[in-house]
Amino acid sequence: MAFVTLQNVTYKYPLTKEPALREVNLQVKEGEFVAVIGPNGAGKSTLCYALAGFVPHFFKGEISGSIEVDGKKSDESTLDEWVLNVGLAFQNPFNQISGAKYTVFEEIAFGLENIGVPREEMKARVEEAMSLTGINDLADRSPYSLSGGQQQRVALTSILVMRPKLLVLDEPTSQMDPIGTREVFGVVRKMAEEGMTVVMAEHKVEWIAEFADRVIALKEGRILMEGRPNEVLTSDLLPENGFGISRYTSVAREAKKRGLWKKDFLPVTLDEAAEGFKSR
Amino acid sequence: MHERLSFHVKRDSFLHRLNPLTKLVMILALILVTFTFPWYWTPHLLVLVAVLPLSLLGKVFREFSFAALRLILPAAGFLFLMQAFFQPVGSDVVFKFYFLDITSESLTFAFKNAMRVFAMVSAFTLFLLTTHPSELMSDLTRRGLPGQFAYVIISTLQILPQMQAKAQTIIAAQRSRGLDTESTFFKRAGSLVPLVGPLVFGSLVEVEERAIAIEARGFTSKHAKTSLHEIPDSSFDKALRWILLALIIVSIASNLWLS
Ligand SMILES: Nc1ncnc2c1ncn2[C@@H]1O[C@H](COP(=O)(O)OP(=O)(O)OP(=O)(O)O)[C@@H](O)[C@H]1O
Ligand SMILES: [Mg+2]
């Protein structure tokens, strides 16, 4: 049975005419790492909020269909119970700083304080989560004094430390350099391997190709396509619908038209492209 | 720019190790006794035997004297002058300044009041220097202060400098597009109107996102909260609070009795 099930979910924010999600059907297995791609305004963030319970519990608006995680229906639960199972880190790292804490260590402990984790266990879990994301050296800094990328790592750590069963990440690497991005994808992959289910909205298709199990392409609130990363990310449908795609895919597609690419698949990453051009 | 609104000096001292509530009761006692105990030299004596030794015990003497000399003393001095000149009491004129008579009564009165204010602000400064705001709030939350209330106080303290920084950014951005922020007052005031939009609406979106962020981290969870830092509360603390409370009552009672 699927760990996450969305059935015919259609959702409209209050005071808007067009739905932000339309008839979304989605199943995610336990321990699966699913990436969500889509142009601006496609509904990626809205889907994240829906999984994390903020749509409709926080944003109100009209919703139909059902959202189920770990056997529980979102509309039969309350937000404060829901967030114990589903962790959310969203786009803007600055606004994810609680504002109640003076150091990064305290900031990461904030969620554990709220759910009543005993002090010794709390410290151990914070240490562990910080080593996982590689931010031990930031422990005593003020969260406000960090760079955007560092703040994003803190935001991710603050959620990981709560050990959610479903981890929802909305563009968690938008302010990170390639090294940071790679590390975050690595951490997320590792969590998935350990059984955490992950849904991540993300633009960086090359990393998705390398790390994700499955890709969902959203457009105007609808699922346009879903499938294995290479299948979706190299589909002709993406460029036709205004999705950002890998430059290696574009190059190989162009090369194919001129008979320079002989493989029967298109590459997403540099390695695949290099391999394909070498052995033609 | 990322300066935070806290005077706390991190140190290990007797005063730092006291429970925040004990310190709160302590400054309250100091202030109330200063204002109510019916003996002229009370504030002066308290500064000498309580405030100054406490600043040493708290290992913040240097920071404290800096604040006392630069801020509190000038303010108290100003208060002294105002009251000495404009308090129309007594007849024993010791000094004439144009049409203003300064009597010995107004001088003693002003001296006492200035000293009271000095003692009060000093005590409060000592409290701020030796108490971490989040420690104070955790302790009060544990004693039943609503978590939301504590959150609002702490986050306001933290966010004010951020808001200020952002206003600077917006001004810079708009000035670079020709906003006038340097000519006459009224022109400038008028031209600041465009600043309100981004600052306020920006803040509203931020407030919404921040609400989501803390909610996602279990802020409204019905579990009993725990706290990362252990907040000291020894039996000495408890005894001290009772003694201070008794002191407050004696002081207020003697004030009522003798007046
Ligand atoms: N709080 C809100 N109130 C009303 N409408 C909203 C709100 N948030 C998003 N929308 C609308 O819902 C639609 C989907 O937005 P969403 O933020 O989910 O897109 P996205 O795929 O995350 O885009 P981006 O790549 O820019 O992050 C958009 O048309 C947007 O204008
Ligand atoms: Mg988004």
Image: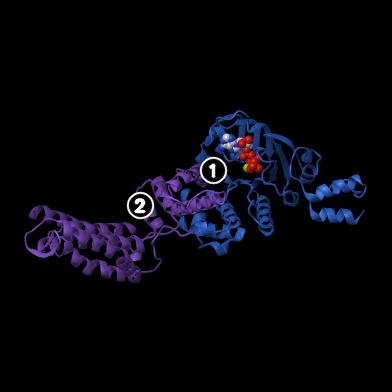
Chain colours: A blue, B purple
Q: Quadrant of the N terminus of chain A?
A: top right
Instruction: Classify residue B129 as left or right of residue B219.
Output: left
Regarding mark 1 in the picture, which secondary structure is present there?
helix
Instruction: Classify residue A46 as left or right of residue B232.
Output: right
Q: What residue type is disc 1 on?
A: Val
Front position in the image: A197 or A226: A226
The residue at 84%/47% (across/down) is A266
Which residue reaches farthest left? B91
Regarding mark 2 in the picture, which secondary structure is present there?
helix
Q: What residue type is disc 2 on?
A: Leu
Residue corresponding to mark 2: B140
Task: Pinpoint residue A106: horizontal percent, then vertical percent.
Answer: 48, 57
Front position in the image: B123 or A75: B123
Q: Identify the chain of the residue marked 2, using the numbered disc in the image.
A: B
Task: Pinpoint residue B143: horizontal percent, then vertical percent.
Answer: 34, 50
Ligand 1 picture quarter: top right
The residue at 24%/61% (across/down) is B78
Front position in the image: B207 or A3: B207
Residue corresponding to mark 1: A83
